[in-house]
Image (cartoon, rainbow, N blue to C red):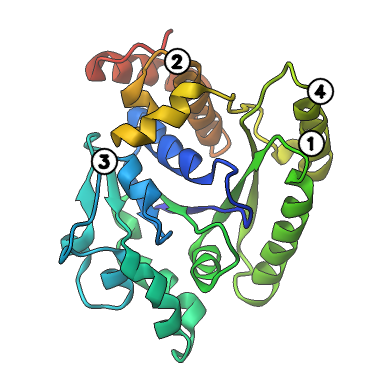
Amino acid sequence: MAEIVCVANQKGGVGKTTTSVNLSYALACLGQEVLLIDLDPQSNASSGVGVVVKEGERSVYNLLTKTAPFREVVRQTSNELLDVLPASKDLAGAEVEFVNIQGREKVLKETLSTIRNMYNFIIIDCPPSLSLLTINALVAADSVITPIQCEYYAMEGLAHFINTTGKVKQFLSPNLKVDGGILTMYDARMNLANQVKDEVSKFYGDKVYKTAIPRNVRLAEAPSYGQSIIEYDPSCRGTKAYIELAKEFLVRRGFKEEDLKEYNLAAAQNAGYDFGG
């Protein structure tokens, strides 16, 4: 049965969608069957893996409102182990429709209950706000990962988000686990980045992922081509960082690092990528 992982932060521009897309793709490259759910009406995670919902096509909105079955909504990406439930602008209206529904915060959880045995991991990309959609994602999730940009206001936003996560855990989802924080747009040459890293480490302790995502131009370019960084530039620092992040993610879940390295090399060769030994 899949672990459902919510990638969320109420602050925008922190690398949330970039992390959702590239972590999902990297996990697929490591042999995991992954479903990426785009729960943001802006649809950036969908377009980031090359999927754009055209007029009249089904999206995750239809799945949530029970106007289309899973098989009519799910789309395969360029990696055969990675599927996506794409978003569309219709998703913005879902919150209004949910207002009068009893148990509205559990709509996504109930929707995923019938399909979670099809994957190893389900990654949810949330809107950059504490909306009803984000609450649905947190309630449906087993764990939550928070991308944290290495900048001045990072800790303030993180504190608010952790407070909200605590309330969701207390009142709606007692089994929700805070998996940890991921530092994004990290530049070790900048004092501010290192200060944020130190503060986040104090806040999260050993829950902070050791792999930090570097500030990388190629990471910023990849979405405009509808590709993950792994497809767009297999040899850049961004690709290597997300592959390492995916390995660390799996090791936290009981996988053996030596097995991942062996599989990673095989997967890289099969896909035509070169991730190193």
| Residue 173, image quadrant | bottom right
Report the Cα–Cα distance between label 1 and label 3: 35 Å
| Of residues 217 and 36, the one drawn nearer to the viewer in this rendering | 217
Report the Cα–Cα distance between label 2 and label 4: 24 Å
Q: Which mark is residue 64?
A: none
Q: Amino acid at mark 3?
A: Gly
Assign a secondary structure to mark 1: helix
Q: Nearer the viewer, mark 1 or mark 3?
A: 3
Q: Which of marks 3 and 4 precedes in the sequence?
A: 3
Q: Which of marks 2 and 1 precedes in the sequence?
A: 1
Assign a secondary structure to mark 2: loop
What residue does disc 3 label? 50
Asked if 194 appears above or below 253 in the picture, the reply is above
| Of residues 115 and 271, the one drawn nearer to the viewer in this rendering | 271
Assign a secondary structure to mark 4: helix
Asked if 60 appears above or below 146 in the picture, the reply is below
Q: Amino acid at mark 2?
A: Cys
Asked if 227 appears above or below 180 in the picture, the reply is above
Q: Which of marks 3 and 2 precedes in the sequence?
A: 3
What residue does disc 1 label? 201
76 left or right of 130 in image: left
Q: Residues within 10 Å of mark 3 (few under 14, many from 20)?
A: some
